[in-house]
Amino acid sequence: MTALDFTPAPGAAPMRQMITAQAVMETRTLLRNGEQLLLTLIIPLLLLAAFSLEPLVNFGGGSRVDFLTPGIIALAVMSTAFTSQAIATGFERRYGVLKRLGATPLSRAGLITAKTATVIAVELLQAAVIVAVAAALGWGPHASATAIVSVPLLVLLGTAAFSGLALLMAGTLRAEATLAAANLVYIVLLGIGGVVFPLTKFPAGARPFLELLPTGALSTGLRSVLQHAAGLPAGNTVTLAVWAVAGITLAARTFRWE
Amino acid sequence: MVKRYGQLTAVDGLSLTARGGEITAILGPNGAGKTTTIEICEGYRRADGGTVRVLGLDPARDGRRLRPRVGVMLQSGGIPPSVPAGDYLRLLGRLHAHPADPVALLETVGLTAAARTPYKRLSGGQQQRLSLAASVIGRPELVFLDEPTAGMDPQARHATWDLISGLRAAGVSVILSTHFMEEAERLSDYVAIIDRGSLVASGTPAELTGSAGQLRFRAEPGLDTDSLLTALPPGSAAKESPSGHYLIEVHGAVEPALLAAVTAWCAERSVLPSSLRIESRTLEDVFLELTGRELRG
């Protein structure tokens, strides 16, 4: 047995070190997980490639990849911040991981910061890969200079909205129910959220409601900035902000750590 | 301390002090309130009544100050299933200011070969050992171990006992719950026996077992134990249970004269006792005496 010094020397590590350590571990866990990678990277890329290369859907003229890329970015945000985060958090609750972390010096605020950093790190990775593949497929964004601000803002608001909903679901439902519901919501919003199927294809009466869904708001907002060179789309921005505030408030009130 | 879950009173006026630098065992049958008591001290639950102080602080209020100083081993789980053992221990180390060396600690708990194995593929005993290592990596002043050796094979159990003794030698206070008598008897400086949420006895293992002696032997079934009793000092007890197994209990140690009396009694009847053993009362005897022998549903 190695001589090990157990003489008490208690103390919390600096907050930054704790958050970094936790975020690095969560990111590695996520990237190691095959199903999560399928959800966050492979499905978005397959949809992007398939719908760009073949005229599977009539987008009403214009470049297919120009239409698709903003929608695929919205899908990528949803898959990471909502589906993947809800499932991971649900199982962490179920396995007592959150309970055990609650006994360490890492505070709840520190843990939430680490989780946010993880989501953003994965999103940056997704963005890099999606932009590269889209560029290879001939993507040419039509954006004004303000896009440099409005795209990150829309993505951040979307991330906050999806994260709130993910934690609302994971903090109240059983892990298996979260797994099923998060996947179902993903499929439904992929279909009706303006990701690959244009919202203009839906009945005119339904469209305003579909744009009020977080996925519809994010995909439409990103499309007006990246495809139509518009400024910050006020309606979509407000929609995402309302979802973010409502989701996070409800999640904070209902979340059960055990 | 009082804790109720709806109609059920899980902890019913339990009063207990664990001294610093010692190993205190909370011993009790399943459902006695051990985990509830420990989880209140860890700050996971709030007591409905009474006063709880851990290192002089209130765990329900001063969690932020207590957490770096206290190590926690949950009864089960708490570790992400897909994370390798070594990575998990390294992460927990990074949450503390002066952690123990994770590589050396992994070796101490016998998990060096399993460092790259995800938690979910470790055996039950290995999972327990990783959880134990995680509870002490932050060099805490005090550790709470909730049934630390449950599910371990004898080798792992002994290695774990060595580690826990090592903690005390280094000046760490240990509070552990267990329903293994041997664990409480060998390891702890102080034992609190709880049942149905209340303290039924407490003291050092020697105090609890007292000096009561036992003499056991096997012989043909159906000997007249009443006549044996008349040959023994007053206050002794003699019984046959199960058939052919005889037990004599006396106050104080078993004296040579008692042994002589028993063997003389056997000789008068031309009975040859076998497997004759002289023992002192064990913690298990005390425990069963206090908490009863019936099975709990």
Image (cartoon, coloured by chain):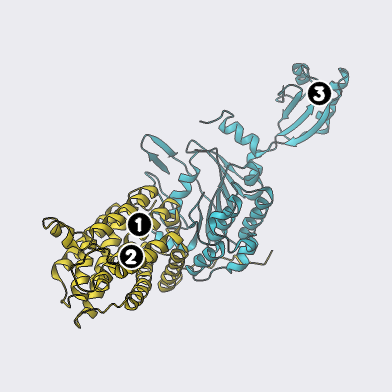
Chain colours: A yellow, B cyan
Q: Amino acid at mark 3?
A: Ala
Measuring from the top left, give residue B166's x and y in whole percent. 64, 59
Secondary structure state at the residue bearing disc 2: helix
Of all chains, the one bearing label 3 is B
Give the labeled residue for mark 2.
A47
Secondary structure state at the residue bearing disc 3: loop
Measuring from the top left, give residue B75's x and y in whole percent. 51, 49
Mark 3 vs mark 2, foreground winner is: 2
Crowd around label 3: few <14 · some 14–19 · many ≥20 (10 Å)? some
Front residue (pair B124, B15): B124
In the picture, the disc for residue B213 is none
Front residue (pair A178, A191): A191
Measuring from the top left, give residue A26's x and y in whole percent. 43, 65
Give the labeled residue for mark 1.
A86
Q: Residue furthest left?
A: A205
Q: Is residue A137 left or right of residue B99?
A: left
In the picture, the disc for residue B219 is 3
Q: Is residue A234 above or below residue B175?
A: below
Mark 1 vs mark 2, foreground winner is: 2
Crowd around label 2: few <14 · some 14–19 · many ≥20 (10 Å)? some
Of all chains, the one bearing label 2 is A
Front residue (pair B161, B61): B161
Q: Amino acid at mark 2?
A: Leu
For the point 72% across and 25% down, the residue is: B236
Q: Is residue B71 above or below residue B260?
A: below
Of all chains, the one bearing label 1 is A
